[in-house]
Image: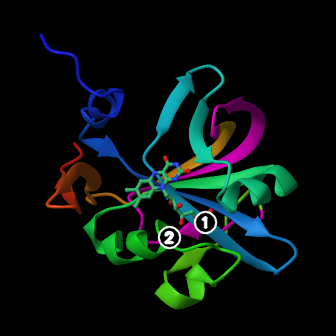
C-alpha cells in the first residue's frame, strides 16, 4: 500500500447521492437552495436526516433563520437545474426563476417541494453541529413524498474535470 493525499481517499466515496437542499429567504421573500452530496440518514426513530453545508455558502443562513428545509432527491430531468443550484449563490440570483423549476406547497413548512423530484422530504431543524469548514444540519423529517417510477441521480465523480451523473433505478 502507498501513502496518498487525504483528498484522494475522500474522492473515493463515489457514487454519491446528491440532494437539493431548499429553504426560504425571508428577506428576499423567495425560496432558495443548493445541492449537497454530503448527506446522511442519522436516526430511524425519530427519522432524522443530515446535510453538511459549507459555511461560506448562503443556504445555511436561511435554514438557521427559518429552522426548516426540504430535501429533494433528483432524477436526470433535474440535472440542468442541479448545475445552477450547485454552482450559483442564492443571494446573487433567484435560482427558482432562472431554472423555472416546478414547485408545489409543502404540508407542514413554508418551503416548496420540487414537483419533479423522485423524493421530497419536509424537515424541521433539530440541531446543528459545526465541523471544520462545514456545518451539519440535522432535520426531523415531518413528511415524505415519492414520484413513482422516477429514478435517482448519482454523482459518479469527475471525468476530465467534469462531473458525471448517472441514473440509478429505484425498486
Ligand atoms: C454535485 C454537487 C455536490 C455538492 N455538495 C455539496 C455539499 O455537500 N455541501 C456544500 O456545502 N456544498 C456542496 N455543493 C456546492 C453547493 O451546492 C454550491 O456551493 C452552491 O452554489 C451553494 O449555494 P448557496 O450559496 O446559494 O447556498 C455541491 C455542488 C454539486 C454540484
Q: Secondary structure at mark 2?
A: helix
Q: Which residue in the protein does label 1 denote?
A: 33
Q: Which residues are magenta?
A: 110-134
| Residue at (34% x, 31% y) in the render | 10
For this view, does 102 lie left or right of residue 168?
A: right
Q: Secondary structure at mark 1?
A: strand
Above or below for 162 versus 19: below
**1 and 2 marks in contact (CB < 8 Å):** yes
**Residue nearest the viewer, comparing 66 with 171:** 66
Q: How many marks?
A: 2
Above or below for 52 versus 69: above
Residue 84 seen: yes
x then y, percent, for residue 120:
51, 55
| Residue at (25% x, 58% y) in the render | 149
Please identify the quadrant where the N terminus is shown: top left
Residue 100 seen: no
- Identify the mark at residue 85; answer none if there is no mark: 2
x then y, percent, for residue 158:
21, 54
Within 10 Å of disc 2 (Cα), the crowding (few <14, some 14-19, many 20+) is many
x then y, percent, for residue 98:
52, 89
Magenta-drawn stretch, dominant element (helix, strand or loop): strand
Check mark 1 vs ligand 1: CB closer than 8 Å? yes or no: yes
Check mark 2 vs ligand 1: CB closer than 8 Å? yes or no: yes
**What is the C-alpha distance between the residues marked 1 and 2?**
6 Å
Amino acid at each position: 500500500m502507498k501513502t496518498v493525499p487525504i483528498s484522494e481517499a475522500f474522492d473515493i466515496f463515489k457514487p454519491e447521492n446528491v440532494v437539493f437542499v431548499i429553504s426560504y429567504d425571508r428577506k428576499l421573500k423567495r425560496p432558495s437552495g443548493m445541492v449537497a452530496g454530503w448527506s446522511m440518514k442519522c436516526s430511524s426513530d425519530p427519522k432524522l436526516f443530515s446535510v453538511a453545508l459549507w459555511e461560506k455558502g448562503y443556504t445555511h443562513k436561511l435554514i438557521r433563520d427559518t429552522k426548516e428545509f426540504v430535501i429533494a432527491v433528483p432524477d436526470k430531468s433535474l440535472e440542468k437545474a442541479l448545475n445552477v443550484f450547485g454552482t450559483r449563490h442564492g443571494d446573487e440570483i433567484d435560482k427558482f426563476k432562472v431554472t423555472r423549476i416546478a414547485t408545489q406547497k409543502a404540508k407542514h413548512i413554508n418551503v416548496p417541494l420540487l414537483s419533479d423530484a423522485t423524493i421530497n422530504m419536509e424537515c424541521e431543524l433539530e440541531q446543528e453541529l459545526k465541523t471544520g469548514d462545514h456545518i451539519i444540519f440535522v432535520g426531523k423529517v415531518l413528511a415524505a413524498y415519492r414520484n413513482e417510477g422516477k429514478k435517482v441521480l448519482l454523482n459518479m465523480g469527475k471525468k476530465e474535470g467534469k462531473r458525471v451523473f448517472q441514473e440509478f433505478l429505484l425498486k
